[in-house]
Image (tube, coloured by chain):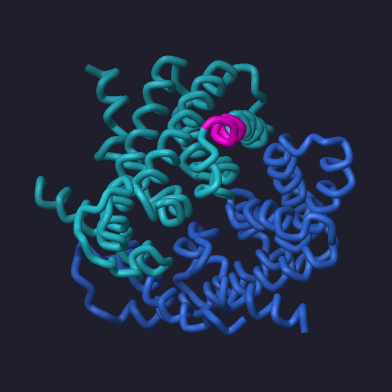
Amino acid sequence: MNKIKILTNGFIKENPTLVLVLGTCPSLAVTTSIFNALGMGMATTFVLLMSNALISLLKNVIPDKVRIPSYILVIATFVSIVDLVIQGFVPALSASLGIFIPLIVVNCIVLGRAEAFASKNTVFDSMLDGIGMGIGFTIAITIIAFFRELLGSGTLFGQTIIPFDGILIFVLAPGAFIVFGFTIAAVRWLQNRNK
Amino acid sequence: MYYILMIIGAVLVNNIILAQFLGICPFLGVSNKISTAVGMGAAVVFVMTLATMVTSIINIYLLIPFNILFLQTIVFILVIAALVQMVEIILKKISPPLYQALGIFLPLITTNCAVLGVAILVTQKFPTSIFDSVIYTISIAVGFTLAIVIFAGIREQMDTVDIPKGMQGVPIALITAGILSLAFMGFAGLV
């Protein structure tokens, strides 16, 4: 039961994007289409899983004073791996996410989980936490991308759903801020109603 | 003329926060008061310029000649983290008043994606010229300061307004940022 709780904690209750409001930059930038959002979500989940596992493994070896640079180094290593894999196997995704793949390094969610969870818990728990938080992040940005793609161009996964030209503003920068704002407000409303 | 267009483009048209979504965390986090926003802006101008200068030198004289560009992300983030620490120590020693003003913002900047983001962007945009990279970075940082100060001004006014409970805090801030970004889109086509 406890293990399930660790895993599902990141889904809704402590959703890193919609409740804790961490990692806002990629949530705004890559949510122009569901394809991009899912790609970004999977890349971040992989980095979270691997860095949480390795940091938890090394938690007794890393000296306390240099822990943040050490964490950053571990995270940067896995981000470079993901970057090269995406460039090699899914060049279309690499082109549309661009600079935001290397920027997973400075995504506060990854460093935040390393510091708050992986440095204090067992390897297995840390891996569960990494997967849970990664899935929570993926869910959140996919919801934002769903509305932006549907309203902005009338498509989902590139398939036409509503045959109209689309409201251009939702694809552009202002739409990202506005949809993200309303999504957070909706999640808060739902949480308060359940209390 | 080339540089004037570049500066206008970086400050107004492709504003780093409102059009490129970099540095959103400090934009939302330290924009409650105009004075703190100005301090953050100044710290970002300082660190970003220094960081890009160092990373573009490393990129041109180390990473490209030795053909190890795949190490770019790791090298850049370590250099930036070390640089911020160093700036903090040096400022403390040389100029205590400046340290007082910028001090609290410096640790925040290490995890600011704008600094790493710009360092990487610049290597793609100006792969060979350090001078162009630095000018471009300064204008981007000025754009960051402009956006965060305007936003802090709006948020100060918003304190007096009655906002529905669910919208308070981050949601209304994001929607305000969206409207501000809409306003900045008016500059599109200027360059």
Q: Answer with left or right where residue B26 lies relative to residue A125.
A: right
Residue A25 lies, with reference to residue A67, above or below; the image says: below
Q: Which residue is pictured at 63% across the width and 76% down the height?
A: B9
- Of B67 and A64, nearer the camera is B67
Say left or right for B63 vs A195: right
Looking at the picture, does residue B176 appear above or below residue A54?
below
Chain drawn in cyan: A
- In the rendered image, the quadrant that contains the C terminus of chain B is bottom right
Majority secondary structure in the magenta region: helix
Q: How many marks?
A: 0
Q: Is residue B38 left or right of residue A178?
A: right
Horizontal and vertical percent position of residue B76: 72, 44
Q: Position of residue A86 (x, y in %)?
A: 54, 34
At 54% from the left and 81% from the top, the residue drawn is: B189
Above/below status of A83 relative to A56: below
In which image quadrant can residue A170 be found?
bottom left
User: Which portion, as a residue range, is magenta?
Assistant: A82-89
Q: Is residue A16 visible?
A: yes
Q: Quadrant of the N terminus of chain B?
A: bottom right
Q: Do we see residue B101 in this rendering?
A: no
Q: Nearer the viewer, residue B143 or B158?
A: B143
**Image side of residue A9 versus residue B116, left or right:** left
**Residue beneath the point at 72% across and 52% down:** B84
x, y (%) of residue A59? Answer: 57, 20
B113 falls in the magenta region: no
Residue B71: x percent and y percent?
73, 35
Rendered image quadrant of residue B77 = top right
Q: Name chain B's colour.
A: blue
Looking at the image, which residue is at 82% across and 41% down?
B63
